[in-house]
Image: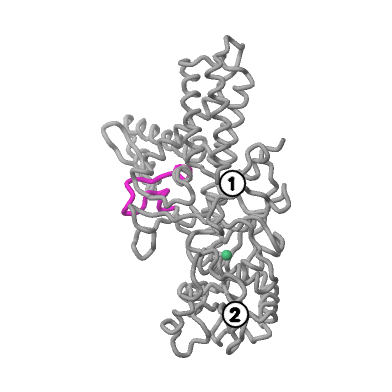
Amino acid sequence: MALYDKYPVAIFNSLGKKKEKFEPINAPRVGLYVCGPTVYNEAHLGNVRSFLTFDVVWRYLEHLGYKVRYVRNITDVGHLVSDADEGEDKIEKRARLEELEPMEIVQKYTNGFHYVTHLFNLKDPSIEPTATGHIQEQIEMVKRIIDNGYGYEVNGSVYFDVKKFSEKYDYGKLSGRKVDELLEQTRDNLEGGNEKQFFADFAIWKGASENTLMKWNSPWGQGVPGWHLECSVMSTKYLGEQFDIHGGGMDLKFPHHECEIAQSVGADGTEPVRYWMHGNMLTVNGTKMSKSLGNSFLPLELVAGDHPLLDQGYSPMTARFFMLQANYRSTLDFSNEALKAAEKGYKRLMNALKSLNGLSFENQGKTDYGLDDEINKQCEQVYVEMSDDFNTPKAIAVLFELVNKINAFENNQLNLSSIKESTFDTLKKVFNSMVTDVLGLMDESDGESNKLQEVMNFLINMRDEARANKNWELSDKIRDDLSELGITLNDGKDGSSFSIN
Ligand code: ZN
């Protein structure tokens, strides 16, 4: 029996706003599409949280035995600075600012994004398609939308006709917007010169001006595809006309995902997505994380502790653990206190993992059936919680009940031989795979930071010896050379410590 049959998954479907049993169209194959970054600046922690949510969804489904194809795109053209389809392309604007080619901006921030995803141990997607790599398919989709009567051209741009669409279909079904209200906003929001017939209409092709750097030939002249179009095209190209899960941040529900549905139905008459999943925001001391409020964090600022709101640096795995302690559909508040607690929790969990793998089962003693049963039930419960819409906080809480047992075995407060050997095997298997494969937590203590600490201890001891021998030349050289590398030695009464600038 496959694990996915034993622990059937329920997903909260944003479309319909309720939990539903997950039934993939082509089980055991699963198609998962997640809106990736627009690569015009550095990803902040709020973005990381959203991608982490779907990393765990992917990991858990694979763990249950599904074969998941995970597509996460890179938006490298077509995302304009304003949601109202006006203004410059975000990437082009940044290129002018940094005096680089748009494709240099794309490469620079794509590299940066990958660096961050690897830092937080997010697995690379199966396919990472780009908008610029799928221009032809996007043009074809615009044509189908026009042919079906849901698109109109004005001055080389093509807009989706929301009013016409809503006569037959339910525009707003995902986000709960009312078309009548959106149409009413037309008078207030469409200034003279705007090409749209209605406020709710959106660009599926945007004509380019002479100064536009990125543009392609099309039946409507040179231009770029509308932002929402790439995801409609790339998701169905790689996952089929209908596929299982589409994910993204809450802020993408409207207009981005609502428009995706309209485009697919308008072009092909099919609703592409079975389950829509949306991850909630990260807040800072209760307020929304945003650049303009000065409270947005870049991942490296978090790790280095280099931010006015931080008391200290926190490791990537502490941050990963911290984010998994909240349900993905709830907002998560980011504060020093919460991060410090997460740091302790993460270490406690990883220490228990090490203890568990160091324990060896010898002879079966007198079985404590109560204890044996409790451990088996807790191992089952981790799956029950994860299968309940990927409830990581509850699954982690159960793992901590197991941590208590493991620590008691380690300290001989409980007798390991009083449980069955098969129970011990189950405990090892479930605990290891949940912590490492599903939650994706790595042991940082064996990594680079530990090596650095060892090398620094070696140099500090060497310098102490030199100073004891009054070899000032060597002791100064060690201090000065380290300083050139950006490492400062701080001498205190309990010996020297170091800090990295
Ligand atoms: Zn998208």
Q: Is 268 left, or right, of 262 in this rendering?
A: right
Is residue 103 at all visible to an observer of this figure? no
Q: In which quarter of the image is the N terminus?
A: top right
Is residue 234 at all visible to an observer of this figure? yes
Q: Is 45 left, or right, of 437 in this rendering?
A: left
Q: Where is residue 292 in the image (x, y as percent from the top left)?
A: 36, 65
Q: Where is residue 203 in the image (x, y as percent from the top left)?
A: 56, 78
Dividing the picture into quadrants, the one containing residue 76 is bottom right
Q: Residue flagged by tag 1: what amino acid is it?
A: Ala
Which dot marks residue 164?
2
Asked which secondary structure carries label 2, the reply is helix
Where is mark 1, residue-wise? 10
The furthest residue to the top: 366
In space, the residues marked 2 and 1 are separated at their CA atoms by: 35 Å
Span colored in magenta: 300-319
Residue in the image at 58% along x and 37% along y: 383
Asked which secondary structure carries label 1, the reply is strand
Q: Nearer the viewer, residue 228 or 10?
A: 10
